[in-house]
Image (spheres, grey):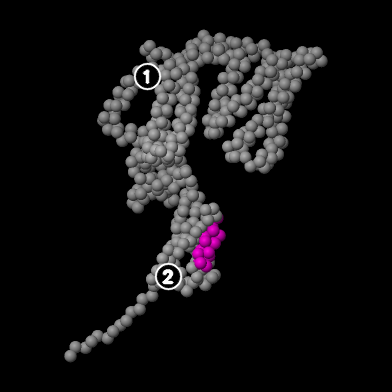
């Protein structure tokens, strides 16, 4: 167990404050005011939010702008509670109310105001999980400052630690390091994404040069963020010398593949070429190849679930060194093709229109935009040959089943319109054997 005078002092101050304030009538009145304000705020949000949402939808805002406005509207509860507490605190401080001490209520007002301000500031962060984490972290620090125990808390965390040689590792340095590392990594990824988009728009560079420069920028910024984040916690990088030496020795004794898969997995996560939920195809895996979706990405392997519920554990290195077909990279739209032929006695223009209409109406998985299209591709030996192409968005639900559904719809449509699907005819002639004389 850690023994810390600062921690004991913080505990004593907290207990003293609780005994001085919580056992008073003023504190009970403040708690009642705060409880009523929060209940009224929750009721106001429940009442107003459903009415505000349709009003926002009428403006046709951009998705990102609409999301920000919706997030701001969800602060109705905090804003309403703040106004009610402020009004109650002002009334309680008058001669009519007997000058009730409202110190704790005003501190809660400051907490609510800080939360609203922080939530407004962090709306530029697109990722909701990262945005909420930033907001909670900043608000926690603000709350400690509002209650006047920020310095005592940091001293208590700094007193909890261990000494490794000449280096001292404290709880405060760990917290600072984690926060700094997280913020720096997010900033590095955000900045690298912005710079990569700028590089991709440079038409003077070749496509391969743009990709290479983008990768170098991302790796460089992430590396610098890691180094700065670790050193900001007060950790001496020379402490990793022993670890790196042991790691190098392990690699020399046969961990090459493991390390390769580890770094390949990190690269896949960084460049976002493959992510969980993507529909991919790996030629040559499982005999004729593997088609399925990414279920899990681990440090050593990536799990692919096929339509027949088989799990293939593919080493991460294979995604870097081998060809991978990602059907949902950038867009989930998948084009499927069906070939068929009809008799020469039918009008190809009518056949084209019937096939396109049948593919759209047969199954809701076939999207209307892009629209299906049917082309006459060849004048065959016994038929007019066509190719029908249509699009779906949910390849993970299967390809063969939707192709079969479209072919059945074509069969029904052709039967309804008396369109024949020809097949080659063969005539066999039997000659009598010539008698030898």
Crowd around label 1: few <14 · some 14–19 · many ≥20 (10 Å): few
N-terminal label among 2 and 1: 1
Crowd around label 2: few <14 · some 14–19 · many ≥20 (10 Å): many
Secondary element under disc 1, as helix, strand or loop, is helix
Q: Is residue 59 visible?
A: yes
What residue is rendered at 42% in x and 19% in y?
A: 231
- Alpha-carbon distance for marks 2 and 1? 74 Å
What residue is rendered at 70% in x and 26% in y?
A: 81
Q: Which residue appears farthest toward the right when viewing the image? A: 96
Q: Which residue appears farthest toward the bottom when viewing the image? A: 437
Residue 436, compared with residue 1, is above or below; it is: below
Mark carried by residue 237:
1
Q: Is residue 269 visible?
A: no
Q: Look at discs 2 and 1 and give the one toward the viewer.
A: 2
What residue is rendered at 74% in x and 18% in y?
A: 89
Mark carried by residue 383:
2
Mark carried by residue 353:
none
From the image, give the main secondary structure of the stretch colored magenta: helix
Q: Which residue appears farthest toward the left when viewing the image? A: 437
């Amino acid at each position: 167990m850690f023994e810390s005078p600062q921690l004991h002092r913080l505990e004593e101050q907290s207990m003293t404050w609780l005994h001085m304030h919580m056992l008073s009538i003023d504190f009970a009145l403040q708690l009642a005011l705060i409880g009523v304000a929060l209940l009224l705020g929750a009721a106001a949000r429940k009442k107003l939010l459903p009415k505000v949402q349709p009003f926002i939808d009428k403006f046709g805002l951009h998705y990102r702008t609409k999301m920000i406005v919706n997030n701001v509207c969800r602060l109705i509860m905090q804003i309403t509670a703040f106004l009610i507490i402020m009004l109650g605190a002002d009334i309680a401080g008058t001669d009519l109310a007997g000058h009730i001490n409202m110190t704790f209520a005003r501190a809660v007002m400051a907490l609510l105001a800080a939360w609203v301000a922080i939530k407004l500031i962090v709306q530029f962060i697109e990722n909701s999980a990262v945005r909420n984490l930033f907001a909670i972290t900043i608000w926690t620090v603000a709350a400690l400052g509002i209650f006047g125990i920020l310095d005592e808390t940091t001293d208590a965390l700094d007193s909890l630690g261990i000494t490794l040689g000449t280096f001292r590792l404290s709880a405060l340095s760990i917290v600072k390091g984690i926060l700094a590392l997280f913020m720096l990594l997010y900033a590095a990824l955000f900045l690298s994404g912005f710079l990569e988009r700028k590089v991709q728009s440079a038409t003077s560079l070749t496509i391969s040069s743009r990709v290479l420069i983008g990768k170098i920028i991302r790796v460089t910024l992430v590396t610098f963020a890691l180094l700065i984040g670790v050193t900001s916690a007060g950790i001496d990088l020379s402490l990793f010398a022993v670890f790196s030496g042991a790691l190098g020795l392990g690699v020399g004794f046969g961990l090459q593949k493991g390390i390769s898969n580890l770094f390949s997995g990190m690269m896949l996560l960084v460049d976002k070429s493959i992510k969980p939920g993507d529909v991919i195809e790996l030629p040559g895996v499982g005999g004729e190849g593997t088609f399925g979706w990414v279920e899990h990405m681990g440090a050593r392997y990536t799990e692919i679930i096929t339509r027949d519920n088989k799990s293939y554990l593919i080493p991460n290195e294979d995604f870097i060194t081998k060809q991978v077909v990602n059907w949902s990279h950038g867009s989930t739209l998948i084009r499927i093709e069906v070939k068929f032929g009809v008799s020469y006695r039918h009008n190809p223009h009518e056949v084209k229109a019937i096939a396109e209409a049948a593919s759209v109406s047969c199954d809701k998985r076939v999207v209307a935009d892009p629209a299906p299209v049917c082309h006459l591709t060849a004048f065959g030996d016994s038929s007019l040959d066509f190719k029908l192409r249509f699009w779906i968005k949910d390849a993970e639900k299967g390809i063969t089943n939707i192709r079969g559904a479209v072919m059945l719809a074509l069969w029904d449509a052709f039967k309804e319109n008396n369109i024949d699907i020809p097949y080659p005819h063969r005539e066999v002639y039997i000659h009598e054997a010539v008698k030898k004389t």
